[in-house]
Amino acid sequence: MEKNFNRIITDVLAEMLQGKTFNKCQLNTLIPLNMNKSANDIIRTLHKRGEVKISHRPPKKHMQAHWYIAPNECKQYLFSPIKSKMLNEKSKAEASYKRDISCVRGIINRRGEEAFIQIINKVKVMK
């Protein structure tokens, strides 16, 4: 069963690398009825693999929401899958770092630097 699901994921990735977009309904039709999986499971697995960045476009007036791979991401992946994965991991780490900085700034803005220093000291004691 898991082997079939991995095959579906591989096929979806291959089609997305050729420029195809998928909405939730299209992904669900690829999954056999006896398999307890959903479109979200496919996308979640592709995200976890981290091979290439899967983007989501929210619904608009005359267009459904769908997942896609940006053309520049496709070219990058097709040129060098290993380098693409490394760059994807690097950009995720940078985004995480920026979120951390934003959270710290928020705490300092709301509570002040002294409160932030107290929080840091409490965390150090907890270790």
Image (cartoon, grey):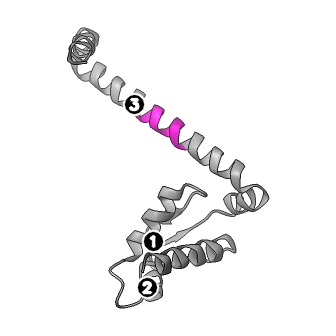
The residue segment tinted magenta is 92-99
Please tell me whether mark 1 sits on a helix, a strand or a loop. Answer: helix
Camera-near label (2 vs 3) is: 2
Camera-near label (1 vs 3) is: 1
Residue 125 location in percent, x, y?
21, 12
Label 2 to label 3: alpha-carbon separation: 38 Å
Secondary structure mostly seen in magenta is helix
Please tell me whether mark 3 sits on a helix, a strand or a loop. Answer: helix
Quadrant assignment, res 10: bottom right
Residue 100 location in percent, x, y?
39, 31
Q: What residue type is labelled 2?
A: Ile
Label 1 to label 2: alpha-carbon separation: 9 Å
Q: What residue type is labelled 3?
A: Asp
Residue placed under numbered mark 1 in the picture? 42
Residue placed under numbered mark 3 in the picture? 100
Query: Seen in the image, is 89 located left or right of residue 42?
Result: right
Residue placed under numbered mark 2 in the picture? 31
Residue 3 location in percent, x, y?
49, 77
